[in-house]
Amino acid sequence: MKITSWTSTSEHERWRDLGTVDPAPIGRIPDVLVQLDDPQQEIEGFGATFNELGWTSLSRLTAEQRAEIFRELYAPGTGANFTIGRMPIAANDFARDYYSYAEVPGDFALEHFSIDHDRDSLIPYIHAAQQYAPDLRLWASPWCPPQWMKTNGHYASSLPWVDGVETGLRPDQVQVEGTDSFIQDERYLATYADYFARFIDAYAAEGIDIRMVMPQNEFNSAQPYPSCTWTPAGLVAFIRQLAPRMRERGVQIFLGTVERPDESLVAGVLADPVAAEAISGIGVQWHGKTLMPFLRRDYPGLRLFQTEQECGDGANDWRYARYAWRLMRDFLNDGANAYQYWNLSLDRGGVSRWGWSQNSLVVVDPDTARYEFTHEYYVLKHVSHYVRPGARLVPTLSYAGYENQLAFRNPDGSLILVMQNDTAQEMPVSILIGDQVVSPVLPADSLSTFVVEV
């Protein structure tokens, strides 16, 4: 056994090759014990989200620059090795503005349904990724239905957070968490299920196969951008309509996305036998993260996707990258089968139509038409570059407070160990793998990924 590859990243030195490490004698109780005999959940992959402002930023670059980015993110064995992608069903909070695929009120036959809006944004965006990852597994969720299907008749659910942002929402149209913002009428529910089906079919005709859907992004959040709150009972009513249409198309349904630390929101949907039969997984993001251990315990037959990394503040600094590592570490150690970033690319500052500044993996400077990969990209790459689909998470144990690592066993038998040193000094650490110990010295304030030949 030996460490055959050691890659390190810190704030000022990215992706350094630190060589190999041979086994050392076991002179004391090791700091970290890798429990190879207790493999946990299977890892399905890593990815990010396609949204309109991402493509807007990338469109400022040359075709050659975009090719460099997509090769780094999606080409197997090159960079991030992304194998999963998320997309919105029509507008989301990082769209150019609100839109839907069926804006004519009362169009229950969906005679005016069209995805033409996406032909200069989402469709070329996804095609660019597919050039390097033709087997990219895509899933989709709406942020809101066509606004005529909502009880307030408006895409937004709350008043703007930021001064100067206008949505036209009146105070009497504000909606609240714990209510159904979607009109709970069978005709509307059936039409919305048909809307999903038409979306799946239209994208398939463009060579983009959607393999899974979730009924609603953050179904508890009344937001000043496209959003729609649902109760568990409302979701059950919709899933009963959605399930047969998705089954006909071979499309899976996950429950989500769940953004609240309230397990009753999940239990209330899965208590319905028809909904439970239709659901093959659960999508979790933001404050839903504290539910992960309980979901893994209570629903062992369902896959768990982390669906959106928390978004940051547009600064893309090392401080937030360190926080991003903790999010990924905890989601994966708590049972996530997949981990997905949010904004793949944004203009510098990352400001949305609704005034929210967010982080991204790629930052484009509109003035110079140059781009850079951010700290968070390298944090994610420290895991996604090495961990293959089909890998199993391997738990680690420490009797000395070393709890800042992730371990995986790849299908080829190699062990991937990712560790953070969050101190300002170099940190020696001894790691027991099987019956041997390796003892690297981690650089200060850094991430390290070790490939171990076991």
Image (cartoon, rainbow, N blue to C red):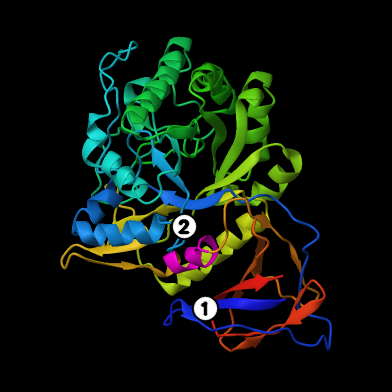
The amino acid type, in three-letter code, at marker 2 is Asn
Rendered position, 312 above or below 45:
below
In the drawing, what numbered circle is on residue 181?
A: none
Is 55 located above or below residue 367 in the figure?
Answer: above
The image shows residue 9 at horizontal and vertical percentages of 49, 77
Above or below residue 198? Residue 4 is below
Marks 1 and 2, how far apart at CA: 18 Å
Residue 434 visible? The answer is yes
Q: Residue at x 64, y 34 (%)?
A: 266
Residue designated by label 1: 8
Answer left or right for 320 relative to 404: left
In this view, the residue farthest toward the left is: 367
Location of the N terminus (image quadrant): bottom right
> What x and y, as percent, mark residue 27?
83, 89
Task: Assign a secondary structure to mark 2.
Answer: loop
Measured along the vertical axis of the image, is residue 356 above or below residue 447? above
Foreground: 106 or 196? 196
Residue 81: mark in rendering = 2
Q: Residue 212 colored magenta?
A: no
Q: Earlier in the sequence, mark 1 or mark 2?
A: 1
Q: Main secondary structure of the magenta part?
A: helix
The range drawn in magenta is 377-385
